[in-house]
Image (cartoon, grey):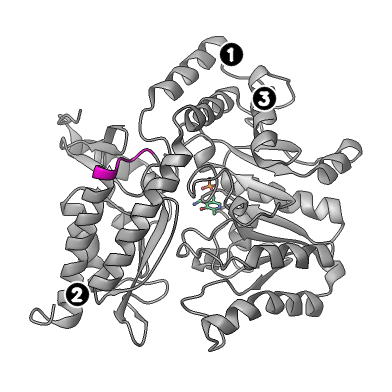
Amino acid sequence: MPEMHPDSQHIIEENREFTMFSWSVQNQANPIHMTGGKGSHFFDGSGNAWLDMASQLVSINVGHQHPKILQAIKDQVDTMCFAGPGFATDVRAELGRKLSEVTGLAKSFFTLGGSEANENAMKMARLYTGRPKIITRYRSYHGATMGSMTASGDPRRWPVEPGVPGIVRVFDPYMYRPPLGMTAEQWEEGCISHIEEVIQMEGPHTIAAIMVEGITGSNGVLVPPDSYYPRLRALCDKYSILLITDEVMSGFGRTGTWLATQHYGIKPDIVTCAKGLTSGYMPLGAVIVNDKIADYFETHFLAGGLTYSGHPVSLAAAIANIKVYEEENIFEHVRELGVHLGQRLEAMKRKFACVGDVRYIGLFSVLELVKDKATKEPLAPFNGTSPEMGKLAAHLKSKHIYAMLRFNWAFVCPPLVITKEELDHGLDMYEEALALVDQMILGPVAA
Ligand code: PMP
């Protein structure tokens, strides 16, 4: 249970004095001093328990401090803490076999996280096809290393521009805001033919792969229409282009399946994953490839790998984490609770003037906030914030609800083990915050 830390403020000050925080202007970083956690909650140095409605960075799927994973890590540390990347290990065999089983693909290449998985997926696609370019989407995030950051379409790529060469971007299945002034119906039809036109203009023989998030995560949980993936798969096949799905955020139970694409009945050629692979307990990512790509590298050099690739303690954590998913029927829980979450989000859309759209699948969801439902004017500008979003953040923080907020989006991505009561409490607090936002945009009387 949470306890007061005797020197919490000093710890925060030393963190800020001697370390740098990611994605921050350093003098604006305002970290919570985290001291522990249990299940859906984590604790801070002032003795508060926070409900983690963001699963940290959408990663701690089985919740904080799951005893079975802690034990597996301890056991592996006692047996063999480290083996170099060229060695065969028990855990490597076991996890590789399991990942082939759950994805239906052939072989896994282990990495330290999601960015590096995407780097290697792009590199493998270029080596295998002999083609130079990768198509990605504008509203995407694929990581913070040079190649993955360039591949990302969202503003986080801007600081490294022009980045690595050969990335071509297309528009997204964002049905609430279709591009080019189209209606949602027109865009459902147009979103794939648009990609085909880009392929033709670029030269199909120059495109190695199309890389898309299984379901777009930090750019607004863009659940595609049912027709999207079958048509994208067919398009890739038509031009012999590989389909890479980045399941770093959407995979491993977040949507109630191993991979988000399993909802749509298609199989990618390459899958990348991280986060929910170990539930964040140890750093690990994977590139999982189909049999043709695996066969190719039987006789061709795979140029890549780091000192810590396939770290045994990370692999042991992943094996234990996957066992927890299976033994505790976590995915069924996600699918069931996801229905309830969807109903509550739909009710919030009806109730609050500021909720323009809600999108959800499993326990992966977002409220898209607007100043005006008719015009869809966002509550904060693209790549910016606003007093209204500030109010929402401050209210949730005051209630010790940890939420992921970005631009005009409020995400709801709790640990997959969250109970219905915990989820309802969290959503009640979101409702309180949305009522305050409604007061700001409508005035106190109308709200
Ligand atoms: N791809 C997606 C879809 C992600 O959400 C993230 C992380 N938020 C990454 C890649 C990068 O993963 P990592 O931070 O483990 O490098």
Question: In the rendered structure, which segment of residues is drawn in magenta?
Answer: 417-421
Residue 111, magenta (yes or no): no
Viewer-nearest of labels 2 and 3?
Answer: 2
Q: Is residue 228 toward the left or the right of residue 433 in the image?
A: right
Instruction: Report how many numbered discs are placed on residues in the image.
Output: 3
Disc 2 crowd rating (10 Å Cα; few below 14, some 14-19, many 20+) is many
Q: CA distance from mark 2 to mark 3?
A: 52 Å
The location of residue 195, given as percent across then percent down, is: 70, 74
Q: Nearer the viewer, residue 119 or 10?
A: 119
Q: Quadrant of residue 206?
A: bottom right
The location of residue 78, given as percent across then percent down, is: 51, 10
| Residue contact at pointers 2 and 3, CB within 8 angstroms | no
Give the residue drawn at x 40%, y 46%.
336
Secondary structure character of the magenta stretch overall: loop
The location of residue 334, given as percent across then percent down, is: 43, 44
Residue located farthest toward the top when viewing the structure as drawn = 79
> Could you say whether the residue bearing mark 2 is in a helix, strand or loop?
helix
Of labels 2 and 3, earlier in sequence is 3
Give the numbered dot on residue 80: 1
Q: Which residue position is annotated with label 2?
A: 438
Q: Which residue position is annotated with label 3?
A: 92
Residue 419, magenta (yes or no): yes
308 vs 427: above or below: above
Viewer-nearest of labels 1 and 2?
Answer: 2
364 vs 104: above or below: below
Viewer-nearest of labels 3 and 1?
Answer: 3
> Could you say whether the residue bearing mark 3 is in a helix, strand or loop?
helix
Q: CA distance from mark 1 to mark 2?
A: 56 Å
> Could you say whether the residue bearing mark 1 is in a helix, strand or loop?
loop
Of labels 1 and 2, earlier in sequence is 1
